[in-house]
């Protein structure tokens, strides 16, 4: 069974700082990896999808990388803003998706 | 485009009652699944379906039933609710079996269930 771990569980940074969220997985037989954002009491919003053949994917201030050989993915957020405060989840797997427990990000104005 | 729609958004049940959580998608995705999200435990897979008429168990299937009679709908039934089933439930859909494997997963807004 795929095990997905996210470190740190919580992160607090001042506005404007660049930051990196980490995701590791145990089984490299994944089709792709997806990063989500979840605001309190809300559903999951897809941020980035990286196919297993790709090394990275970018959307605006977000950049996600994937290294299947080491079982790791990172989500880089540039010039963080208070509106980025949320829980960030990564998920991967073959047909079924397995989730990490998330990183709760707080960006302080 | 509606995407994935879940109903109801909130529900309170008494122990022993039954209910059905509804999930519908309009993207012609053959793969649909149900997750529950509990504090500190992340999202855990309850049941999934790879197409109409085909369902299978995930990590935590006990106490839940599913069926898939159409591509669009994937209801989750609680047969006899227990306080341990208090959770937030999410439905997801995507395509599998394409040349690139699984496509982007879309999630509903969730159903917050409390069993008293």
Image (cartoon, coloured by chain):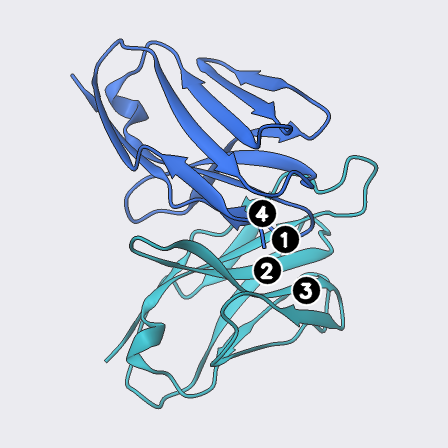
Chain colours: A blue, B cyan
Task: Find residue B33 and name its label.
Answer: 2
Q: Position of residue A78 (x, y in %)?
A: 38, 11
Q: Are marks 2 and 3 on the same chain?
A: yes
Nearer to us: label 1 or label 3: 1
How far apart, in angstroms, are the residues tagged by discs 1 and 3? 10 Å
Nearer to us: label 1 or label 2: 1
x 72%, y 68%: residue: B70
x 27%, y 10%: residue: A17
Residue at label 4?
B3
x 42%, y 28%: residue: A22
Q: Are marks 4 and 1 on the same chain?
A: no
Nearer to us: label 4 or label 1: 1
How far apart, in angstroms, are the residues tagged by discs 4 and 1? 19 Å
Earlier-in-chain disc, 4 versus 3: 4
Q: Are marks 1 and 2 in contact (CB under 8 Å)?
A: yes
Q: How many other residues sit within 10 Å of disc 1, few (<14), some (14-19) or many (≥20)? A: some
Q: Residue furthest left?
A: A109
Residue at label 1?
A96
Looking at the image, residue B79 sits to the left or right of residue A66; the answer is: left
Nearer to us: label 4 or label 3: 3
Residue at label 3?
B49
**Callout 1 secondary element:** loop
Nearer to us: label 4 or label 2: 2
Q: Are marks 4 and 3 in contact (CB under 8 Å)?
A: no
How far apart, in angstroms, are the residues tagged by discs 2 and 3? 6 Å
């Amino acid at each position: 069974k795929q095990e997905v771990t996210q470190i740190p569980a919580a992160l607090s940074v001042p506005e404007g700082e660049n930051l990196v969220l980490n995701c590791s997985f145990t089984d490299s037989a994944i089709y792709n990896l997806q990063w989500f954002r979840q605001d309190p009491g809300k559903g999951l919003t897809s941020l980035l999808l990286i196919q297993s053949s790709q090394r990275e994917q970018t959307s605006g201030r977000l950049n996600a990388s994937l290294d299947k050989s080491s079982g790791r993915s990172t989500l880089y957020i540039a010039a963080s803003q208070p509106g980025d405060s949320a829980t960030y989840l990564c998920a991967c797997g073959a047909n079924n998706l397995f989730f990490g427990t998330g990183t709760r990000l707080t960006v302080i104005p | 485009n509606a995407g994935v729609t879940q109903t109801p958004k909130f529900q309170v049940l008494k122990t022993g009652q039954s209910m059905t959580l509804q999930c519908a998608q309009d993207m012609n995705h053959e793969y649909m699944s149900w997750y529950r999200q509990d504090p500190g435990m992340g999202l855990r897979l309850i049941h999934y379906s790879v197409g109409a008429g085909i369902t299978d168990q995930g990590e935590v299937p006990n106490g839940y039933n599913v069926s898939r009679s159409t591509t669009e709908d994937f209801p989750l039934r609680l047969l006899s609710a227990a306080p341990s089933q208090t959770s937030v439930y999410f439905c997801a859909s995507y395509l599998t079996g394409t040349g690139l494997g699984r496509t982007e997963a879309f999630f509903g807004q969730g159903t917050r269930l409390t069993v008293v």
